[in-house]
Image: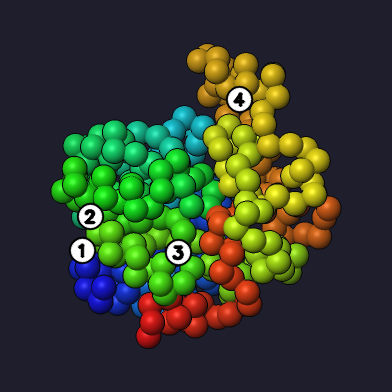
């Protein structure tokens, strides 16, 4: 596990990516992750303007020369996508993680600049598509992931992918302990993408209520909601989530299925969910919508990122 396709590709010590967590991952967390021997990615949508995104990239580069990436939503709901991609290329980030859309344009433009492209997938069908487009690696988002989770268990998804694609397969979801870390490599993964375990880190900027919830709730308290982004999103089943429900209402379902209206409806949902998640993460409110994965089961204290990495990797 010391040297894998992922460590060789990005020249990092440990084959771990701190996953890009919407409105959670911060430059401070990324810098701490890079200094701990792993890599990290930050969502472009964490920033309202491309100028802010560019400033963040420059700031991280001023603090460390270690490789890091940017996560881009490449479907039509992200109206800033092309501007964000341009900023990433101009500022020569080390890699891009694409999510929720067709990565063809990102792959073509990044390859010309020597920027690696890692693509989120949830099944073999899309894995083969992005491989054919030229993806450098696949991030296999399994059923234990936080945020936009897949439907297939880690072992089944990893095994299926490594048997049918030639690019490295990075597992995303279900890792918070050294044993789980080893299991993913035992299945054949080339690396691990993990996010939930870092939410309760000392460097994390979310409020104490969010961090406390990560410690308090268990894996069985994770539910999937359709009400935030138009796609299923895993969140902690707080009293507020129980109150508002997790199923889309009739109007939401109609708008989400209408081909002409779906693009604009998803844009509206993204804007609304950004505001709701930002309020829950950074201010004290009873309206708590906190993203997390089932790996909260194994998180029982707030630690520095370096210690989290050491414990998971066994160093």
**Distance (Cα) linking label 3 and label 2:** 18 Å
Q: Is residue 26 visible?
A: no
Residue 293 position within the rendered picture, expressed as x and y whole percent measured from the top left? 55, 55
Secondary structure state at the residue bearing disc 1: helix
> Dot 1 corresponds to which residue?
5
Q: Are marks 4 and 3 in contact (CB under 8 Å)?
A: no
Q: Nearer the viewer, mark 4 or mark 3?
A: 3
Determine which quarter of the picture holds residue 284.
Answer: bottom right
Q: Is residue 294 visible?
A: yes
Residue 197 position within the rendered picture, expressed as x and y whole percent measured from the top left? 53, 67
**Distance (Cα) linking label 1 and label 3:** 19 Å
Q: Residue at x 49, y 77 (%)?
A: 308
Q: Are marks 2 and 1 in contact (CB under 8 Å)?
A: yes
Mark 1: few/some/many CA within 10 Å (<14, 14-19, 20+)? some
The first of marks 3 and 2 along the sequence is 2
Secondary structure state at the residue bearing disc 2: loop
Q: Which mark is residue 175?
A: 3
Q: Nearer the viewer, mark 3 or mark 2?
A: 3
Secondary structure state at the residue bearing disc 3: loop
From the image, which quarter does the C terminus lie in? bottom left
> Dot 2 corresponds to which residue?
168
The first of marks 2 and 1 along the sequence is 1
Q: Nearer the viewer, mark 1 or mark 4?
A: 1
> Dot 4 corresponds to which residue?
265
- The answer to whether residue 74 is above or below residue 299 is above
Q: Are marks 1 and 3 in contact (CB under 8 Å)?
A: no
Secondary structure state at the residue bearing disc 4: helix
Q: Residue at x 38, y 52 (%)?
A: 154
């Amino acid at each position: 596990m010391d040297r894998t396709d992922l460590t060789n590709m990005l020249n990092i010590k440990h084959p771990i990516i701190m996953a890009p967590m919407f409105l959670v991952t911060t430059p401070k967390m990324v810098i701490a992750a890079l200094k701990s021997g792993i890599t990290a990615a930050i969502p472009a949508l964490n920033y309202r303007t491309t100028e802010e995104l560019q400033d963040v990239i420059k700031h991280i580069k001023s603090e460390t020369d270690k490789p890091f990436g940017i996560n881009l939503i490449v479907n039509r709901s992200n109206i800033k996508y092309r501007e964000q991609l341009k900023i990433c290329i101009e500022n020569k980030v080390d890699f891009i993680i694409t999510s929720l859309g067709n990565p063809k344009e990102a792959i073509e433009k990044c390859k010309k600049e020597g920027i690696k492209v890692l693509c989120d997938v949830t099944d073999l069908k899309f894995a083969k598509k992005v491989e054919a487009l030229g993806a450098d690696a696949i991030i296999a988002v399994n059923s234990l992931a936080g945020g936009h989770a897949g439907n297939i268990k880690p072992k089944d998804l990893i095994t299926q992918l490594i048997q049918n694609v030639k690019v490295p397969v990075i597992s995303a979801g279900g890792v918070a302990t050294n044993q789980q870390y080893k299991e993913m490599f035992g299945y054949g993964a080339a690396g691990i993408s993990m996010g939930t375990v870092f939410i309760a880190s000392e460097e994390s900027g979310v409020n104490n209520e969010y961090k406390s919830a990560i410690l308090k709730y268990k894996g069985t308290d994770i539910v999937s909601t359709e009400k935030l982004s138009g796609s299923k999103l895993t969140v902690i089943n707080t009293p507020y989530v129980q109150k508002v429900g997790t199923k889309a209402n009739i109007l939401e379902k109609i708008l989400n299925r209408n081909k002409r209206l779906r693009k604009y409806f998803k844009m509206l949902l993204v804007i609304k969910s950004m505001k709701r998640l930002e309020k829950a993460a950074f201010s004290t409110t009873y309206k708590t919508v906190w993203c997390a994965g089932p790996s909260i089961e194994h998180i029982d204290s707030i630690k520095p990122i370096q210690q989290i990495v050491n414990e998971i990797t066994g160093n």
